[in-house]
Image: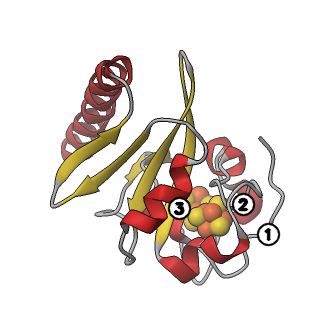
Amino acid sequence: MEKIRECGECDLCCKSLVHEVYGQQVSSDNPCRFLKNGCSIHPNRPPQCKRYFCMWAQGVLPEWMYPKDIGIMVSVKDWPQGKWLEVVECGGEITDDFLMDLLKFKAPIKYMKDEEVVIIGPPEFEEFYQHYAQQILSTLLCTTNLQMKK
Ligand code: SF4
Ligand code: SF4
């Protein structure tokens, strides 16, 4: 998918999307160090930043779901049977109505509730997600170990 909408003043993915930026593993506990009133290295940001567009920026979600306004970011990801949606609270709250809107896309959904992973999807997706989560965890541990050795 491509970018359809401009991000404007939103910077939630620079604070909450788990991805690597020049040796830093960005996550909600560890916002990108280059985020200074916008991306301070915008022309030279890494390819993974250039490639990422949330579901709203892709023009798929309705206008009112602008991440900065609702404090929720929705990422579209691939799995062997199609797409799945990762929903992350970034100051907002995932409500039942919000989930009902996402269910219209007929894709598995993953989000966190009371620090527990919640999955709405078939058992095959749950199995896929377990492997996916393990990979993310190993990457995070690996990066932390490397940073501790420096
Ligand atoms: S969360 Fe979406 S709208 Fe916000 S900065 Fe990232 S891609 Fe743009
Ligand atoms: S390098 Fe720029 S675009 Fe990428 S996460 Fe950091 S601030 Fe955001």
Q: Is mark 3 within 8 Å of ligand 1?
A: yes
Which corner quadrant of the image does residue 36 belong to? Answer: bottom right
Residue at left 27%, top 25%?
Answer: 130
Query: At label 2, which amino acid type do we have?
Result: Ala
**Disc 3: CA contacts within 10 A as few (<14), some (14-19) or many (>=20):** many
Query: At label 3, which amino acid type do we have?
Result: Cys
Query: In the shown orientation, is residue 76 left or right of residue 148?
Result: right
Q: Which residue occupies the foreground of this view, 52 or 47?
A: 52
Mark 1 or 3, nearer chain start = 1
Q: How is the image coloured?
A: secondary structure
Question: Can residue 108 be spotted in the picture?
Answer: yes
Q: Which residue is mark 1?
A: 6
Query: In the shown orientation, is residue 20 left or right of residue 133?
Result: right
Mark drawn on residue 57: 2
Residue at left 80%, top 54%?
Answer: 3
Asked if marks 1 and 2 touch (Cβ < 8 Å), the reply is yes
Q: Secondary structure at mark 3?
A: helix
Q: Secondary structure at mark 1?
A: loop
Q: Quadrant of ligand 1?
A: bottom right
Which corner quadrant of the image does residue 113 belong to? Answer: bottom left
Q: Marks 1 and 3, Cα distance to the nearest angstrom?
A: 13 Å
Question: Can residue 14 be spotted in the picture?
Answer: no
Q: Secondary structure at mark 2?
A: loop
Q: Which residue is mark 3?
A: 13
| Residue 147: percent from left, percent from top | 27, 46
Mark drawn on residue 22: none
Residue at left 70%, top 44%?
Answer: 51
Residue at left 29%, top 32%?
Answer: 133
Q: Is mark 2 within 8 Å of ligand 1?
A: yes
Query: At label 1, which amino acid type do we have?
Result: Glu
| Residue 35: percent from left, percent from top | 53, 72
| Residue 27: percent from left, percent from top | 36, 56
